[in-house]
Image (cartoon, rainbow, N blue to C red):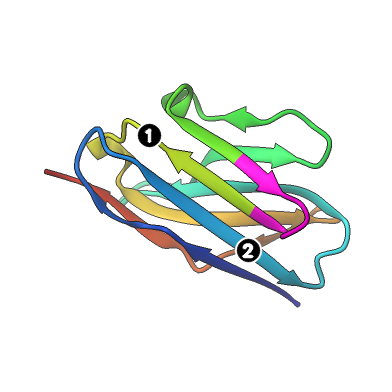
Amino acid sequence: QVQLVESGGGLVQPGGSLRLSCAASGAIFGINAMGWYRQAPGKERELVATIPSGGTTRYADSVKGRFTISRDNAKNTVYLQMNSLKPEDTAVYYCNVRILLRDFWGQGTQVTVSS
């Protein structure tokens, strides 16, 4: 089994910053990629950013230049630094780990951007 534990969500004012973390444990051999998705009310889940093992990071156009994804392989942890947050960034953010082409998901953490 794979366990993903997320942290770092919360309420922030527009223009503020948050940092999300996701620690993976369990049967995590052969990780292909780690990343973040989000789902706003009434919308489909969408990719925010992904960082493949040995590959190039990829971002949604809506977050380029504001969000940065990073990964600590020694800790099996992926981070999402979110700056210049906007109300439209409000969503539940889900950690994703792809292992041998199978997707595993965290429980989700709420990010609310509001004044």
60 up-or-down from 82: above or below = above
Closer to us: 54 or 62: 54
Q: Is residue 64 visible?
A: yes
Percent x, y for residue 23?
63, 63
Q: Nearer the viewer, residue 41 or 82?
A: 82
From what the image shows, is residue 15 above or below residue 94?
Answer: above
From the viewer's side, name the closer residue of 36 and 11.
11
- The stretch in magenta equals 70-77
Q: Count neighbours of disc 2 (C-alpha within 10 A) and say few if under 14, some if 14 to 19, many if 20 or more.
A: some
Q: Is residue 72 magenta?
A: yes
Q: From where the camera sits, is residue 45 visible?
A: no
For marks 2 and 1 on the same chain, the one whose residue lies earlier in the sequence: 2
- At x 28%, y 37%, the residue is 88
The secondary structure type at the circle numbered 1 is: loop
Measure the alpha-carbon separation of dots 2 and 1: 21 Å
Kindly identify the amino acid type of the residue bearing the numbered disc 2. Ala
Residue 52 to residue 96: above or below: above
Q: Which residue is mark 2?
A: 23
The residue at which mark 1 appears reads as 83
Give the residue drawn at x 44%, y 29%.
63
User: Is 21 a magenta residue?
Assistant: no
Provide residue 109's location: percent of width, then percent of height: 41, 61
33 versus 84 height, above or below: below
